[in-house]
Amino acid sequence: MATRPVKDDRLHVRLTLAQRARVNQAAAAEGRTVTEFALAALAERAEHVLADRRLFGLDDAAWESFQALLDRPAQVRPRLAELLARTPPAE
């Protein structure tokens, strides 16, 4: 039997009566508790927001330009090489 992760934190929200009624109605429509519904909705929205920062769409012209930048030879950056060759201050 799989163990469930320990839930050791809470999220408190304040709702208007109308908001609470709407959430209750939506949770019931999906056959979930309000907590299950809220957690699923929060997780889905969080994934959407974070995906928007990891993925991006380009039109054909922008994609070609991006590909050209990726395909060009690396440029030598002496100051960057010098910086990366230094021993970090923490060592």
Image (cartoon, rainbow, N blue to C red):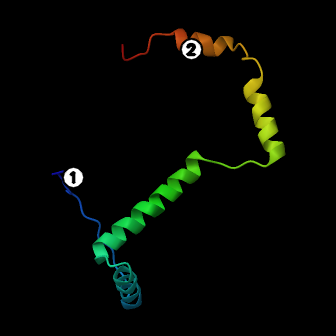
Q: Residue shown at 71%/13% (left/top)?
A: 76
Residue receiving disc 1: 5
Q: Position of residue 34 (x, y in %)?
A: 30, 77
Placement of 89 over or under 42, stated as above or below: above
Q: Position of residue 26 (x, y in %)?
A: 40, 82
Badge 2 or badge 1: first in the primary sequence:
1
- The secondary structure type at the circle numbered 1 is loop
Q: Residue shown at 35%/79% (left/top)?
A: 27
How crowded pointer 1 is (Cα within 10 Å; few <14, some 14-19, many 20+) is rated as few
Q: Nearer the viewer, residue 33 or 77?
A: 33
Residue receiving disc 2: 83
- The secondary structure type at the circle numbered 2 is helix
Q: How many numbered marks appear?
A: 2
Residue type indicated by callout 1 = Pro
Q: Residue shown at 57%/49% (left/top)?
A: 53
Residue type indicated by callout 2 = Leu
Q: Position of residue 21 (x, y in %)?
A: 37, 89
